[in-house]
Amino acid sequence: MNGFLYGVALQCKLDLRSRTMLISCYAVPLLFFAVMGGIFTFIMPDSKETLIPSMTVFAVSMGALIGLPPSLTEIYQGDVKNAYQANGAPLSSGLIFTNISAFVHLLIMSFILYMAAPIAFDAKIPERPGVFFAGLVIFIAVSLSIASIIGLAVKDISNTSMFSILIYLPSIMLSGIMFPIDLLPKPFEIAGKLFPAAWGYKLLAENALTARTLCPLVVIFLAASALCCVLLTKIRTR
């Protein structure tokens, strides 16, 4: 119990000093929303129909893939890992608490976009909010599982951002939020389906929990979770 409480307290301290999490979860998504939301709706008025899903996918992908990995690398490749072990907290608690913290931040950011888009740009509100947020929870979890692999696998924190960007850019460009995925060459369309953003956008835009969109996300999540377990085992034995 003491180890658990120590992990919670330590995570709160890390969150308070993490500029990367603040910038990637709030500052950049809000700036992108303010600028690109106006551009999209001015050039393509029909984009109001899918503005909330597209901005949400951008915000979640940015916060997860850019914001989470540096925090995990800092924990498991530095002195924070020793602090967890010295105070009796399970080594996996760093991964768990960091993911929970990032999940809450991303959920808050998504709710802000959900409320602000209709006011700022007359965006269409999803007809079934419950289904939309259920899909959002799934998409956030899957995105964080991919981000966790980066944070656990990269040993040098200075390289974490580089690997995050290498995953983030194709994830966004091939997701369909910038332009219809049907316009992409077939190889790029297939490559885009390897990333959760493409399936997350389809899930949120369709506002329906169908097996066609849920199954790929579940497969990605299970594969990423298994790989995270392997990486944690390697870290524990170092």
Image (cartoon, helix red, strand yellow):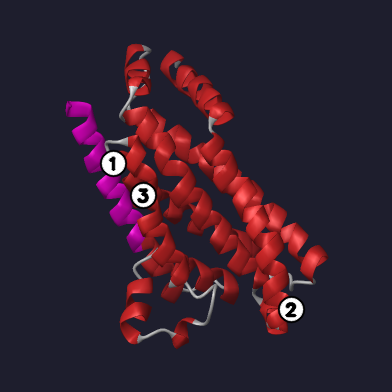
The percent coordinates of residue 22 (x first, y second) are 59, 40
Image quadrant containing the N terminus: top left
The percent coordinates of residue 238 (x first, y second) are 17, 27
Which sits in the foreground, 82 or 221?
A: 82
Residue 162: numbered disc:
3
Whether 20 is drawn above or below 51: the answer is above
Tell me what residue is drawn at x 37 percent, y 68 percent: 216
Tell me what residue is drawn at x 33 percent, y 62 percent: 219
Between circles 2 and 1, the one closer to the viewer is 2
Question: For mark 1, what is the residue?
Answer: 154
Residue 133 picture quarter: bottom right
Residue type indicated by callout 3: Met
Q: In the image, is 92 to the left or to the right of 35? A: left
Which sits in the foreground, 145 or 61?
A: 61
Contact (CB < 8 A) between labels 2 and 1?
no
Q: In the image, is 217 to the left or to the right of 153? A: right
Disc 2 to disc 1, how far (Cα)?
41 Å
Furthest residue toward right: 119
Q: Helix, strand, or loop for circle 1? A: loop
Can residue 120 be seen in the rendering of this structure? yes
**Few, some or many C-alpha atoms within 10 Å of disc 3 (few <14, some 14-19, many ≥20)?**
few
Q: Main secondary structure of the magenta part?
A: helix
Question: For mark 2, what is the residue?
Answer: 42
Q: In the image, is 197 to the left or to the right of 115? A: left
Whether 221 is drawn above or below 83: the answer is below
Residue 225 magenta-highlighted:
yes
- Magenta stretch in the rendered image: 219-238
Residue 163 magenta-highlighted:
no
Q: Earlier in the sequence, mark 3 or mark 1?
A: 1
The percent coordinates of residue 57 (x first, y second) are 55, 63
